[in-house]
Amino acid sequence: MSQLPNEAQGAAIGILVYTIVCMLCNILMMWLLWTAGETLSHIGIICIFLLLSVSVNIIQQINDNLFWVDVMTARWNHIRANIDNPMLAASNGYTGLDLVLWSIRFGSYTIAAGLACFWALSLAGVVYDWTGRRHWKLINQCGKIVSVVLPIIFVGLCHLETIQSSEPLFYFFADVLYFLFIGAGAILLLLIVLKYVRTRRELNAWTWVFATGYTRGGSSVARAYRLDGERTSSSDSTVQPQEQQFQPKGIYDSWLLLRLCIAFACLCIFEFNTVIVQITGHADMVADASRSTPDLSPERARRDFALLMPGAIASVLAFITFGTTQQFRQTMYRTFVPKQWQQKEEEHVSGFTRAPPRLSIAVTSAEHSEQGHERGGDPDANRDPNPATEPEPEPEPEPEPDG
């Protein structure tokens, strides 16, 4: 039986349904990434932690709905006993199970910011041709580990009494990683945009293409950045002619730069919301501590449940930002639209489209090449193994001897 006030039941149910829809969008995005072999890519791991975040969000909503009076009473007692603890302002005074669930959500958001930062580093490496340098692949892979491990350590440190005894030290460990990831990612994004502007001036085109025929010194490399149909700055680098066609792959398409900008804008907005909650949180805790009884009003219930909404929207934004590429739209179209309603495809054959009538920039995806066998297939499985070649000219007939 729910302990939530009847006046707040409608809002709580609506927010719960909204959060479930966000979770379904996240699951759909993860399925699309799995079909493209990008489950363990930067975006794939981001979606995994966003799914974890939205799942514990739902658990907290159900727990607070069923045990509202008990939760608020325990929270009120905790606030009165620890009014100067900065953890109260940061976590809205959560204690017990709610505090554990908040820690998981908070850590997941920081992990997502870190993965976005290192993904921007990976793309910047493509654009500026850093991929050929020594240890680049190791740096790219370690970035994923650092993005996951460091936030977990820092969130754990925030629970130590020694850290909580100093408000500046607590907020340093709580927020420094997120700000560093967002700041570094913004700088890398700016570098990519500068390259984009210069490329637009020189070529009037910019296209991210998944290609695998780039070779350097006879061996293929994980990523490549070059102009289709021309030689690179390295004299021993060439691209096979059959790879010079536009092939959108997973999240990599001509709108990738815009998608990356939207992702970082959303991360900045979310961090701004987090800072506002932390600034106003202490005043709320002081107001709660001054009460003679816990605040069990419907208004308080609606406000507390509404605070859980911004974190859930990240799953929807991830789907809208990265799940709407051409390949993913085709995948959803073929899977969810009944066969008799599907129109015949005239322009797309075997996952390829015609090359756009412009110069383009080829990009080889390391995440594809590293995960090509994830689903038991080769990343080039969709490519024609016997590309068409120009017919050899027929030999001229030998002249007949005189006489």
Image (cartoon, rainbow, N blue to C red):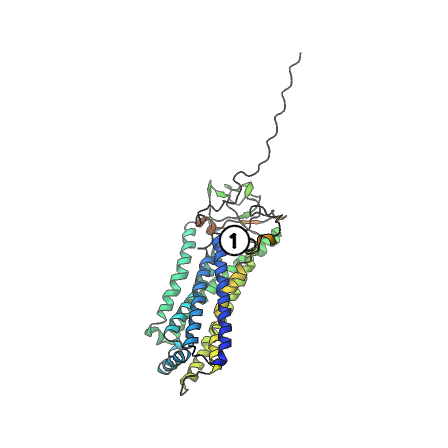
Mark 1 = which residue? Answer: 250
From the viewer's side, name the closer residue of 96 and 257. Answer: 96
Can residue 349 be seen here? The reply is yes
Tell me the element at label 1: loop
Q: Position of residue 310 (x, y in %)?
A: 49, 70
Q: How many marks?
A: 1
Q: Quadrant of the N terminus?
A: bottom left
Q: Position of residue 36 (x, y in %)?
A: 49, 52
Q: What residue is shown at x 46% (from left), y 81% (from top)?
A: 5
Q: Quadrant of the C terminus?
A: top right
Q: Position of residue 29 (x, y in %)?
A: 50, 59
- Quadrant of the image occupied by residue 58: bottom left
The kind of residue tagged 1 is Gly
Q: Is residue 401 left or right of residue 101?
A: right
Rendered position, 220 above or below 20: above
From the viewer's side, name the closer residue of 380 and 282. Answer: 380
